[in-house]
Amino acid sequence: MKTIFQSIQDFSADELNLLDDLITFRTLKKGELLLTENQVCNEIVFIKKGILRSFFVNHKGDEITNCFAFENEFMASFASFITEEKAEENIQALTETELQILDRKALEKLYKSGFNWQETGRKLTELEFVNLHKRMVSFQKLSGAQRYQELYENHQKYLQLIPLQYLASYLGITPRHLSRIRKAIV
């Protein structure tokens, strides 16, 4: 986690060492939920090893995958974390997953410690917004086949590591349609 923060902001050793007393650790088994719908998200996790998926359950009871996070990435129900309201999504481990955790109190302590931590929080929030915007635009402008093509060209790890039913849901298409698209592209 320190390496990621250092890549975002030029921290002193003392600033980075503040993390030592604030980070907690957790391991999730494959399939275990980190967060469930209607629970308030009070922590941001950093993935040391493994894969997490965020998903919603729609009005039909179908799971709709919202996003994935891999090693060296952060994950949270950011809307719930920011507003302190109940989450609308679930977060699940797709593999055994090792996490470093910053809870709300720890993050507030970092923000109060100085400008660099505040600036890092702002930059990470902006990055999350941009990623969300790009995903929204892709659903407005691109077909399912085009969204798959974009993953094929830019995110091979999704295609290699994510079960097909979750990948289809993430792309907004049926598993059958995904199978046809995959055959056409390969």
Image (cartoon, rainbow, N blue to C red):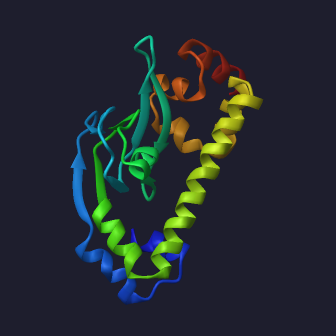
Decide if residue 93 is in sight here. Answer: no
Residue 91 vertical position relative to residue 110 in the rendered view, above or below: above
Image quadrant holding the N terminus, namely: bottom left
Q: Position of residue 170 (x, y in %)?
A: 54, 29
> Which image quarter is the C terminus in?
top right
Question: In percent of the image, x 69 and y 42: which residue is there?
Answer: 153
Residue in front for this viewpoint, 100 or 61:
61
Where residue 19 sits, quadrant-wise, is bottom left
Q: Residue at x 54, y 66 (%)?
A: 122
Q: Nearer the viewer, residue 84 or 4?
A: 84
> Which quadrant of the structure image shows residue 86?
top left
In the picture, residue 149 is in which quadrant?
A: top right
Count of labels in the image = 0
Image spot of residue 60 (x, y percent): 44, 10
Residue sitting at 54 percent across and 58 percent down? 125
Residue 87 placement, left or right of 161: left
Residue 160 drawn above or below residue 101? above
Looking at the image, residue 143 sits to the left or right of residue 37; the answer is: right
Is residue 77 in view? Answer: yes
* Residue that appears at 67% across and 43% down: 134
Name the residue nearer the viewer: 36 or 94.
Answer: 36
Residue 117 x, y percent position in the rendering:
45, 75
* Residue 95 image position (x, y, % from top left): 32, 40
In the rendered view, tell whether residue 8 sits above or below residue 130.
Answer: below
**Could you tell whether 34 is left or right of 126 in the image?**
left
- Compared to 13, does 103 lie above or below? above
